[in-house]
Image: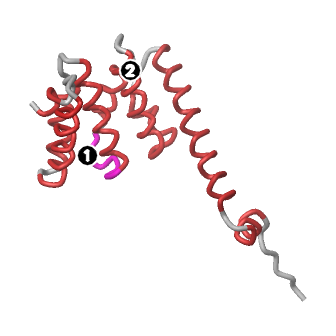
Amino acid sequence: MLCEKSGLNNAVIKEKVKNVIRQVFLIYDNKKYVQLMFKYGVQNKNLRAVSETIEELILYIKEHGLDNITEKDLQSMAKLADAADKGVRESALSFIGEVYKVLDEEVWRLLGPINIKVKGLLEGRFKQVKKGSVSLMNSSINAASPLERKSVLVPKTTSSA
């Protein structure tokens, strides 16, 4: 029911429902709750609710990792990446992109057989993820002080006598 209400038009109610969903992760068994979100949220008839549920699952992955996400869940997300609705499609691609950040190229094996269109979309998303992580790494190096930057970029050499 919470997942269905997360797709409402009223912004105040939607935010309150999202906060309740996040708090349930603190109270309820995460494995069961993730499975309930996939069962009742991701397979909902309301496409906006599906998109919002996937966004909450993305936040869950960022905070807790992939411990409770199954191979079947990833395959259902790959099917949603081919959805006609743009919101659902983008959310599903973002979800798989977060999984890619953790698993790297192993994600292809777990996704199973996917059609060419989805594969192209995923390859584009994975390039964005790689580019984002490289630019994030570069920005953290550039933010370092000059002495730290020098030690990061130039390895220290020891002279042997």
Q: Which residue type carries mark 1?
A: Asn
Q: Against 159, is 125 above or below?
A: above
Q: Quarter of the image containing the N terminus?
A: top left
Q: Which residue is drawn at 70% across and 70% down?
A: 148
Which residue position is annotated with label 1? 68
Callout 2 crowding tier (Cα within 10 Å): few <14, some 14–19, many ≥20: many
- Would residue 22 be found to the left or right of residue 84 on screen? left
Outermost residue on the top side: it is 84
Instruction: Based on the picture, tell me whether residue 67 belongs to the magenta stretch.
Output: yes
Name the residue at 62% across, 57% down.
Answer: 140
Q: In which quarter of the image is residue 90?
A: top left
Query: Depth check: 134 or 66 in front?
Result: 134
Is 44 rendered above or below residue 106? above
Identify which residue is drawn at 33% across, 21% down.
88
Examine the image and state in which quarter residue 15 appears: top left
Residue position for label 2: 89
Type of residue at label 2?
Arg
Identified at 74% across, 70% down, the residue is: 151
Instruction: Point out the tag, 1 or 2, that comes first from the N-terminus.
Output: 1
Closer to the camera: disc 1 or disc 2?
Answer: 2
- Mark 1 lies on a secondary structure that is loop
Question: Which label belongs to residue 154?
Answer: none
Residue with the most extreme left position = 1
Label 2 SS: helix
In the image, residue 52 above or below residue 67: above
How far apart, in angstroms, are the residues tagged by discs 1 and 2?
Answer: 22 Å
The percent coordinates of residue 124 (x first, y second) are 56, 26
Name the foreground residue: 129 vs 19: 19
The segment highlighted magenta reads 63-69
Residue 39's place in the image compared with 142, above or below, is above
